[in-house]
Amino acid sequence: MFVHMFLLTFFTLRGAQAAQCTVGPDTWTGGTTSIAISGEGPTGSFTASATGAWQNAPGVHFPNATLWLGDCPMPCRGIYGVISATCDRILWDDGVGSVWTRPHPRVPFNATISNLLPRRDDTGAILRVQDGCLQNFGGVWYLYGARYQCCPVDEQPACYQTCGWRNATFAVYSSPDLETWHLESDNLLPVATDPNSPHSNANVAYFEPCALYSKSSDHYALWFLTANTKAVAVSDSPIGPFESVTWDTGLAQGSDSYFWQDQDDPAGTWYVKHNGPPPPGDNRGTHYVSKLAPDLLSFVPGATSAPMSVPAEPVPPAYQGSWPSCSEGGGMFKHAGRWYVMAAVCCCFCHNGANAFVWVSNNGPLGNYTLQNTVDAMGLLGNVIPFNKSSGMYLTGAQQFSVAQIPRFGGGEPLPMYIGQRFGSADDGLKCHDYQ
């Protein structure tokens, strides 16, 4: 199976997401015929089950509601959950705010996504969020990214030193439907804006934030890049604030770390695709996949793929200065039982876009991976985003930054959605308004 990528001007995305739920005894109008749930209560593990359209707790009445009781010893007995037929989240009134989830049902959604118009928030402002990731937590979409300053596009030849390599923060927007957006935070990592910190953004570059949720630790881990390291911070909320855990996770330096959660794994294991040192005697840009620890604050030692090195064929002239030793961008995803890894040419905020070399594994996320056997018009092996000689640009006009997981309506593995940053595309010529 080959992967092909192309630019769509507008497209309608049909997928599924968790229903939005408001907990309360008076708000539910649907129910299910049977359910069995197990979990951890305030005094230990418990199981609960119910059959029939409605079951009410002894001595407690909830009109038009389905109720499940815990059967663990007192004081656990009497825990109840109220849920609608289309709600993915079960909240138990146990006094400590415990939350359980179940995989189904999900509700369908349609979203029309434009690659020709800038995305705007609920105030009408253009979204200032670039080179990050898109996640879904509890039925809400969160778009993470670097929030660059509004310097003019003519600073690109100097690699935007004042607003690209300095003075950036991390931002997150939320959305119920991938169309309407709300700015939740423009400073996810407060230490970056502390002028007295050695990590102040006045002296340190910040790129590519992405938040992941650890079910086992019940926290959110924010992975990000600085100029020299891949770092991680933690928060109890997807909108932060995040506090640093380590400034060097041990993954190799470089502008490359992209994530995918294995939905077929009951543990929901996360993997990271990252760059790293080439094999001895090889000077080509090299990439790896590593397994993350359950708390998502580090990677598992010894759980790393064999190296994937980019082809040595010539690339277009504008990209030859650092080729083939520098390779960056891309992402990873799973589709139809295969795992895919992507990487590209190297450039500084690529105005002409970038390509996508693709490796495929039929043996799980840690490979082994083989370079996809396709050749583009420039003669590049394994590349699926061709270069247009007449325009001097790659087809998408974007430099890729991750692949999003879109839950599929009806179940099954997620739909992969390409996310790329079109540097230099802003209508007003300001870097902070570049298209994504």
Image (tube, rainbow, N blue to C red):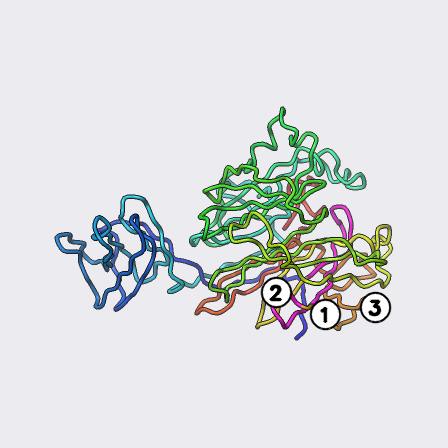
**Picture quadrant of residue 358:** bottom right
Closer to the N terminus: mark 2 or mark 1?
2
On the image, numbered disc 3 is attached to which residue?
A: 379
Distance between the alpha carbons at the discs numbered 3 and 2: 28 Å
In front of the other: label 3 or label 2?
2
Q: What's the residue type where badge 1 is placed?
A: Thr
Please determine whether, in this image, residue 85 is positioned above or below residue 237.
Answer: below
Mark 3 burial class by Cα count in 10 Å: few <14, some 14-19, many 20+: few
Closer to the N terminus: mark 3 or mark 2?
2
Q: What's the residue type where badge 3 is placed?
A: Gly
In front of the other: label 3 or label 1?
1
Q: What's the residue type where badge 2 is placed?
A: Pro
Secondary structure type for disc 1: strand
- Percent across and percent down for residue 158 are 80, 38
On the image, numbered disc 1 is attached to which residue?
A: 370
Q: Which residue is drawn at 57% across and 58% down?
A: 260
Number of marks in picture: 3
On the image, numbered disc 2 is attached to which residue?
A: 365
